[in-house]
Image: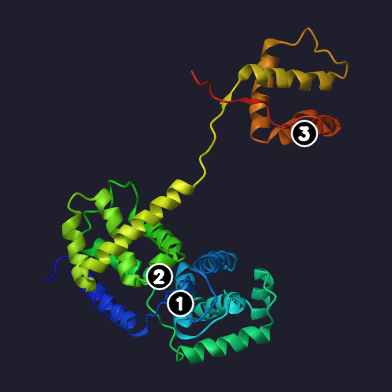
Amino acid sequence: MKPPGEEENQRLGKLLLNTLAREMRLWRTPVLKHGFIQGSDIGPSQYQEVIVWLHEMSTVFQFSSETFALAVCVVNSLLATVKAQLKYLKCMAITSLILAAKIHEEDEVIASVKHLLEQSGCKFSTAEIHRMERIILNKLHWDLYIATPIDFIYIFHGLLMSKYPHLMFVNSQKSPCLQASLWTRQVQHCMACHQLWQFKGSILALAIITLELERSTPDWFSVFTGLLRKAQIESTEFICCKEMVDEYLTGLELSLPTNAVYILDPTSMLMFRGYDMQDEYGDGNRKADVHEDQEMDDFCDGFWYLYDEATSMKAERRGPEDTSATFQEKISPCPPLQPPSSE
């Protein structure tokens, strides 16, 4: 009797071999020459910009990550095959996304070409998209089943869970499902980087997974070597890819804007509510007989202002004769916040 998970591991092993064969047969990548993609006037920054835009369109159309990844692979294969001009790049990209959707998405998810163009804001006509579809299909010999990095992410993840179920990435505090989702997002970021397009999807996917294994698994090296052997990847090329991926993803993390930290000053909040009380009673002076519990209620109201909920809360308490809208036009809807002390 086979141990638990062995049958699944064998099935995934066969799937990996078939996907590697598709990658070997269909994978193509553009070549940079003198700062431009060979045979075109398209630079790396322009390429990255259109790939980022393509991901935005995929999100707008509610397409899957597999659809986006296949669209990028189709764009790369086309750029490696034909002499393209920059003015046609966006048309190539959106057409590649539509073709990828026809392979991966359900029919009810895909809108008409006209509707997709309207959603994307592109000024291409339906006829231009259909003409570009024929060009792409002819140049790629009607075979768009290119193995993508995300295909390999799913396969490697399945192999890890079937053969090493004890990992479960406890140290990273992520469930297996969330972990696969994180790797998918990282792959999507890397697919927009022109320095990384020289690596096959299998290498890129394994590099991302290995970086996580190093951080979360003490015996990561034995796990990694097993995957490397199954994927038939040369170690030298893999190490180069892993270092570049690590540098690129670290750069993305460092480029994220830091959140400013503020400390709420209760004194300023009470002063803020004091102005509100003046407006409420209309005579410019607070009533002397305001009770302490009313002050506490006003203090809490300041928090409602802070989270932009004051209008609805006041409407419930004051009724239709609420006149606070006029006062809101005069002042900020949020009480003053003080920057943290340097002491």
Q: Position of residue 311 (x, y in %)?
A: 74, 35
Q: Are marks 1 and 2 in contact (CB under 8 Å)?
A: yes
Q: Which mark is residue 206?
A: none
Residue at figure coordinates x 53%, y 21% from the top left? 341
Q: How is the image coloured?
A: rainbow
| Label whose residue precedes the other's in the sequence (1 or 2) | 1
Q: Amino acid at mark 3?
A: Ala
Vertical arrangement, residue 50 with respect to residue 211, above or below: below
- Read off the residue under disc 2: 197
Please tell me which residue lies in front, 8 or 194: 194
**Mark 2, other Cα within 10 Å: few <14 / some 14–19 / many ≥20:** some
CA gap between label 1 and label 2 equals 8 Å
- Read off the residue under disc 3: 315
- Location of the N terminus (image quadrant): bottom left
Q: Is residue 331 left or right of residue 8?
A: right
Please tell me which residue lies in front, 120 or 170: 120
Please tell me which residue lies in front, 312 or 240: 240
Q: Amino acid at mark 1?
A: Asn
Label 3 or label 2, whichever lies nearer to me, is: 2
The kind of secondary structure element at disc 1 is: helix
Q: Are marks 1 and 3 in contact (CB under 8 Å)?
A: no
Taking the view exactly as shown, the residue that stands out farthest to the right is 283
CA gap between label 3 and label 2 equals 57 Å
Vertical arrangement, residue 16 with respect to residue 266, above or below: below
